[in-house]
Image: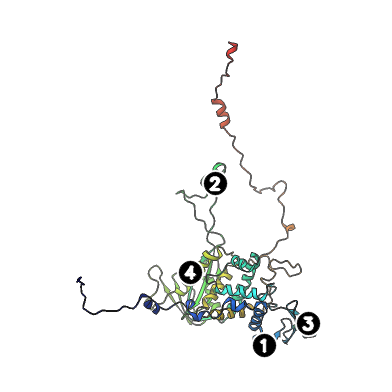
């Protein structure tokens, strides 16, 4: 018999590995209770079924077979124009025609209801967000159309979350910088390198490594999180140039109310978060990640962790104009933690189908000439500049104006040299000798 050290004669039956594993708490996303709907259930019945779903989301409270006219507010059964998929207001003085998205954040979206529902469901299920490219491929939309649609969704999320009551109680605050990277200048090779003799080491530092530039568009997002268990956290955020004290103190007043306990890192930007009902705890991140009472800023940090995932994996870039809107998308995603996918879709529908008439992202490319034009200084919008207003660079430069001039090319030397090295004495004809 083979010797077994320390065998006490009792045979212990260990449960299989899977049984141990099963005791660990699964993420809510992996549980069956998360999956209360799916794409087939939502759009399987085609456009009509999807339209009924959207009608229920938008006008469910108005009663069966009732719609609310977005022009005059009349509640009732309006005339349905089947061929145009429009309603016509039954009020004689109004007679406005409206679709399922008229007067909402999705105003002027020209998508069939099933397609629209599918895009929104893909948005809900894209836990690291979803790119406009992917939406465009899945739904046969141009990339521009998909991008603007997603921006309309983010705009609805932002406005509705800003309207929600201010945060209170235990609040964590933190900031993270985005749009940092600036492409280093070209080093160049061959003739281009030779042409840059004045800037021999363009793009290189003294160690012959590419210098690190910070992009002038770099901005920070400041997030305030009302902490609590999963599903009870609430978020507010804003875009700032830097974590300045004045900015953050103003945001604290705007986003938070009542008895507040702030927890932040040691950055001086948070030092003005003061008030009669405000306590401020600072976690020295150089030493520890939480203090003796287990206060930390983990909820704020994990918000940025999720945003960085989406930034690197899905969006690849965010313009300075839209950065805050992308942030609000994740604020919404974080508040949805713990809810089933249908609850999340219904929450999203309630936000995007809310009344809205500012047209911030509808007619985004300003193709309708009679629409009032936006303020060109507003960096949140794309503004088409009239070509004729741009001065042409023509003629002699004005006094003091510096224009780029190509450096004169050096003459190629080797031809002369090679000519010189050739035998200077012409070969003599032996016949003449
Ligand atoms: Zn009406």
**Tag of residue 95:** 3
Quadrant in the rendering for residue 317: bottom right
Q: Nearer the viewer, mark 1 or mark 4?
A: 1
The answer for how far apart the CA atoms under marks 2 and 3 are is: 66 Å
Q: Residue furthest top?
A: 433
Mark closer to the chain start, 1 or 4:
1
The location of residue 407, given as percent across then percent down, is: 61, 41
The answer for how far apart the CA atoms under marks 3 and 1 are is: 19 Å
Taking the spot 31% from the left edge, 78% from the top edge, the residue there is: 14
Secondary structure category for the residue under label 4: helix
Mark closer to the chain start, 3 or 4:
3
The location of residue 285, given as percent across then percent down, is: 41, 69
Q: Is mark 3 within 8 Å of ligand 1?
A: yes
**Tag of residue 62:** 1
Q: Which residue is mark 2?
A: 188
Q: Residue furthest bottom?
A: 63
Quadrant in the rendering for residue 370: bottom right
Q: Which residue is mark 4?
A: 305
Mark closer to the chain start, 2 or 3:
3
Residues marked 2 and 4 touching at CB (< 8 Å): no
């Amino acid at each position: 018999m083979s010797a077994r050290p320390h065998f006490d004669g009792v045979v212990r039956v260990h449960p299989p590995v899977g049984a141990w594993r099963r005791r660990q708490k699964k993420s809510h996303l992996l549980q069956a209770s998360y999956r209360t709907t799916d794409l087939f259930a939502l759009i399987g019945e085609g456009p009509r079924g999807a339209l009924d779903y959207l009608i229920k989301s938008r006008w469910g409270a108005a009663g069966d077979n009732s719609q609310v006219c977005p022009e005059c507010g009349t509640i009732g059964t309006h005339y349905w124009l089947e061929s145009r998929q429009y309603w016509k207001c039954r009020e004689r003085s109004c007679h406005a025609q409206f679709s399922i998205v008229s007067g909402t954040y999705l105003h002027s979206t020209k998508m069939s209801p099933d397609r629209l529902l599918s895009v929104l469901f893909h948005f809900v299920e894209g836990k690291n967000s979803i790119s406009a490219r992917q939406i465009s491929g899945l739904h046969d939309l141009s990339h521009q159309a998909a991008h603007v649609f997603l921006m309309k969704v983010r705009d609805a999320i932002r406005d509705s979350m800003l309207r929600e009551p201010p945060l209170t109680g235990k609040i964590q605050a933190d900031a993270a910088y985005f749009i940092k990277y600036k492409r280093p200048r070209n080093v160049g090779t061959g003739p281009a390198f030779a042409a840059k003799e004045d800037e021999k080491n363009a793009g290189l530092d003294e160690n012959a490594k590419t210098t690190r530039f910070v992009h002038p568009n770099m901005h920070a997002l400041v997030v305030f999180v009302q902490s609590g268990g999963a599903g009870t956290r609430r978020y507010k955020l804003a875009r700032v140039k830097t974590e300045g004290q004045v900015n953050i103190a103003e945001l604290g007043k705007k986003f938070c109310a009542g008895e507040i306990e702030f927890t932040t890192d040691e950055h001086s930007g948070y030092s003005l978060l003061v008030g009669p009902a405000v306590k401020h705890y600072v976690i020295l991140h150089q030493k520890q990640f939480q203090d003796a009472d287990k206060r930390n800023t983990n909820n704020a940090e994990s918000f940025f962790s999720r945003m960085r995932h989406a930034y690197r994996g899905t969006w690849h870039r965010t313009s300075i104009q839209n950065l805050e809107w992308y942030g609000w998308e994740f604020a919404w995603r974080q508040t949805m933690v713990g809810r089933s996918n249908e609850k999340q879709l219904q929450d999203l529908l309630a936000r995007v189908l809310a009344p809205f008439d500012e047209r911030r992202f509808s007619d985004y490319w300003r193709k309708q000439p009679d629409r009032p034009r936006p303020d060109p200084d507003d960096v949140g919008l794309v503004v088409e500049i009239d070509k004729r207003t741009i001065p042409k660079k023509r003629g002699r430069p004005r006094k003091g104006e510096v224009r780029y001039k190509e450096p004169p090319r050096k003459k190629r030397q080797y031809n002369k040299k090679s000519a010189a090295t050739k035998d200077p004495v012409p070969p003599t004809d032996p016949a003449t000798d």
